[in-house]
Amino acid sequence: MIVRISRYILIVVSIVVMAIYLPDLYWLFFDVKTSSPYVSYSPVDSMFIMYRHGDNGLVFYDEEGNTYTREEYEEKLPLFYYMQLIADGRMPDSLHGIPLDPNEIKTNRNNHRIRTYTHDVPQIPLYPLLESESGRVTLEFPDEFFRITDKGMEFVNSKTKKVNKEKSALFTDALKNADFQFPAKRVYTNPTTRKPFDEGCFVIDNKNEFYHIKRAKDQPVVRNTRLPEEINICYMLVSENNLKEYYGIIISEDNRLFFLTYDNYKLVELPTKGIYKVGEMTVVITTDLFFRQVTLNKNDGIDVFVTDRNYNLIDEYHESWKPREAYPQGKVARAIFPFSLSAEDDSSAYVGLYSEWHFPLAWIGNLISLLLFALFVKKEGRTWKGAIPELILVTLTGIYGLIACMVYIYVPLWRSERK
Amino acid sequence: MIKKIFYKEWLKIRWAYLAIAVLFAAVMIYIFASVAHTYKFNLAATYWYNIIFRGISFYSSLRYVPLFSGLLLAAVQFIPEIQKKRIKLTFHLPVNEYNVLLVMAGIGFLSLVVMFGVYCLIFLLLGYAFFPAEIVHSAVLTTFPWYLLGLTAYSLASYIILEPMWKRRIFYILFAVGFGNLFLYGWFYNIYDRVLIGMLIVTILLSISVIYSGHRFKKGVYK
Amino acid sequence: MEYAVECRNLTHYYGSKKVYENMSFTIKTGSILGLLGKNGTGKTTTINILNGFLEPKAGECYIFGENSQYLSSETKSRVGFLLEGHIQYDFMNIYQIEKFYSQFYPQWKKDPYYELMRKLKITDKQKISTMSCGQKSQVALGLILAQDPDLMIMDDFSMGLDPGYRRLFVEFLAEYGKAENKTIFVTSHIIQDLERLIDDVVIMGYEGVILQSSMDYFMNNFRQYDFKLKNGPVDLEKDDVVTNFDRVKNHASLYSFKSPEEVQAYLKNKQIEFEDFVEVPMTLEDAFIGITGKY
């Protein structure tokens, strides 16, 4: 019995190993080249303009198919390439009657990227709380890190590893006064000194309310943001920037994107028309003097939405291309490999066993594998009855099961198990 | 029987076991001496920041130590058994052949568990001396797959050594390397947290692999 | 029990290469059987089957009435086993190895072991791996003597041994065999060692068993006749009378189980003229070569 168990364990493990590596090996040889465009909205022509990597370097063109030189392309995006245009003396003074002041352009220019897995990254629950009103020109990194446990908010000194009781009590009381329910479920912050100012951190408490906690002149500033109840936060990107229009970007559990604004924590929804899916798409959000742009990048396409400064949708762009799975080699792969496994996935930074199933096309390969295995069983002179579990396994796992059952060859316990 | 077999296994593994203990001790000393050094010469807050937000670990030199330990132990325990097919002597002992194999593999496996357990505890306690609980617990969980890899490597190396045919050994080695690689994805902390239980179960299941190649040896299957 | 070992209809192949087909032999309890054969005729295969390290394609062996593929611990403890080349756990020293084995055998007799060890010029702490072939053989022998098994299986005990050690070994075995009902199964490629030792003999050729008989019968009845062929070279096919035939020019050697008269009649019958017909006395080794041929 234990001989059989040990064999099946080895077979199953090798099937998993093959399902992880063999499809990758296959694609190493037969992969398809796809290039996604980099899409921007030109304030000059009020249309989408883009570039992509072609066979002979970068290709610049617009949504109507006109192609441009690199210089022409840059001139259509003065809010992006203003430094280059100024250096070349090509920068216009104004656009549509609005003066183009380099400082204004810079202040309005923000670029935020949220990767597919950013919402699901492990985090050691210790955070710095920067002093937001130190009176110094630059921000300074504090010696203390805080945690928010069920007992309260604790500040731990990184040098002495001791808890600063006074400060911890001060902040815990402030949180209690604001009806904060300990412990914190999640903390979002932007732990860097390379930003113009500090907005502290945003915290989901134990009853799912969303709090804003700051440290000003070593005193706690705690506010309940009172977000609408239907908003369940999946992720928040905190970004202090000089535009001072929003604290950051919030992704809700129902795949919506918002700016959390300085206007009393009002949420402004960014247009995605229900296309956005957390974990599947990389979001790039840019702001500039004229527009707000949301770009959703996925494996097989790109969706771009542009709004004016008041967040009214003014234009959108959609392009999709064949994913490699839709090419003939993709179909062959699905016929050969009944499934593929992966320890990693775009949707999470955590290791897991992520699977992708290729049925019904995979039955082709599985049945061929079954046939080959049946011939092998016959050649080995085994009884069909004894081979039933393996025949089932090969039917379900195809090429993987076939290789596994042949490598971990059946060794009879008793000779009578042979014909 | 366990006590009787243990005598033989211990004679084979004792020096390697001692070497592993010394290696672990050296790595632990190195890790925490480096930590103490960093605290002394760098800003503690920056150190914590690097650990927490940049995922820079202070214990990365531990990564391959359990793997090496498992491979070494399997080698010193099972290579003498297959040299000149000495395992025939073991199979001829007046005890059940499969039980002997299980006991042998179990002795090696548990010796490693004890070694890893002790050093994991030392790591935990030394960790507490330098870091807050959050960082220490994250470190222990992050190193856990490495210990499991050590145990898995021991089990897989043992059954590969015991396999009588080189042509099969090559496949076994390919699978084993592919499988072992799954324990070493990424450098960020805690990314294995969700699969630790599954990995633990597979590690325990694989500890009986040696039965399969032992059975092939016993039945004299050379194909 | 009449037979300590019974092997019935053994058939084995390595891939498509036949080792033997339908081989049967028995070893009477209390007797010593020698399995002789050239390299590659399946001596070790037989030993492996007997010890349960190889499952034959067909047929089975019984040791003390138990199928050798599934020997119980009790039966295994009654069987002493010497591996080809006197292989032992050579990472142990002579003290450790005695201590290790003694745990497994209730009737363990350490005195014969240490008696033998004292004759070797080694210390208790010396690892077996550092010993000479001869010394290793004595350790392996000592362990088997201490185990005091009812059946000893020895795979090519003379391999790598000096004549002195070989003699020692044979003497020990002969002594042991005389003791109450001990059965011994030996293979060797140095035939002369076995001459005074074995009671029964099995000789294997590339096609299977050539001969199976008692030593007495074999040595008394198997004969070599030399004669000169008068009418030039003639070759004889093997048959009932001619077990083997060997010829250099006109000088012929004929091996047979038949009497001189019968052989001469046979030759006359075949109209082969001969002269100087003599019976040549043979050692076991001569007989072995006579029956298996030189190649």
Image: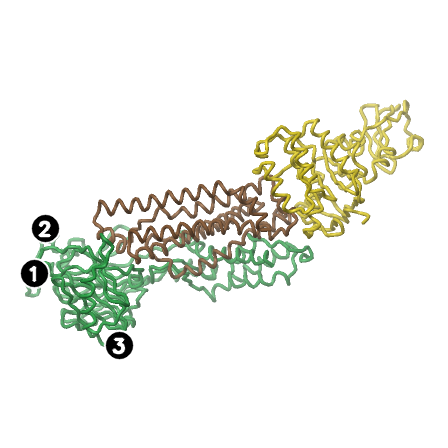
Chain colours: A green, B brown, C yellow
Looking at the image, is mark 3 or mark 1 earlier in the sequence?
1
Res A200 → quadrant: bottom left
Residue bearing the label numbered 2: A88
What type is the residue that disc 1 sits on?
Leu
The quarter of the rendered structure image containing the N terminus of chain A is: bottom right
Residue that appears at 76% across and 47% down: C7
Protein chain holding label 1: A
The percent coordinates of residue B1 (x first, y second) are 60, 51
Q: In front of the other: label 3 or label 2? A: 3
Judge if badges 3 and 2 mark residues of a common chain: yes
Protein chain holding label 2: A
Q: Is residue C28 left or right of residue A76?
A: right
Q: Is residue A411 left or right of residue C21?
A: left
What type is the residue that disc 2 sits on?
Asp
- Residue placed most toward the observer, C43 or C291: C43
> Are discs 3 and 1 less than 8 Å apart at CB?
no
Q: Which mark is residue A230?
A: 3
Mark 3 burial class by Cα count in 10 Å: few <14, some 14-19, many 20+:
few
Mark 1 burial class by Cα count in 10 Å: few <14, some 14-19, many 20+:
some
Report the Cα–Cα distance between label 1 and label 2.
Answer: 16 Å
What type is the residue that disc 3 sits on?
Glu
Identify whether C29 is placed above or below A219.
above
The percent coordinates of residue A48 (x first, y second) are 20, 64
Residue bearing the label numbered 1: A100
The percent coordinates of residue C23 (x first, y second) are 77, 45
Question: Element type at marker 1?
Answer: loop
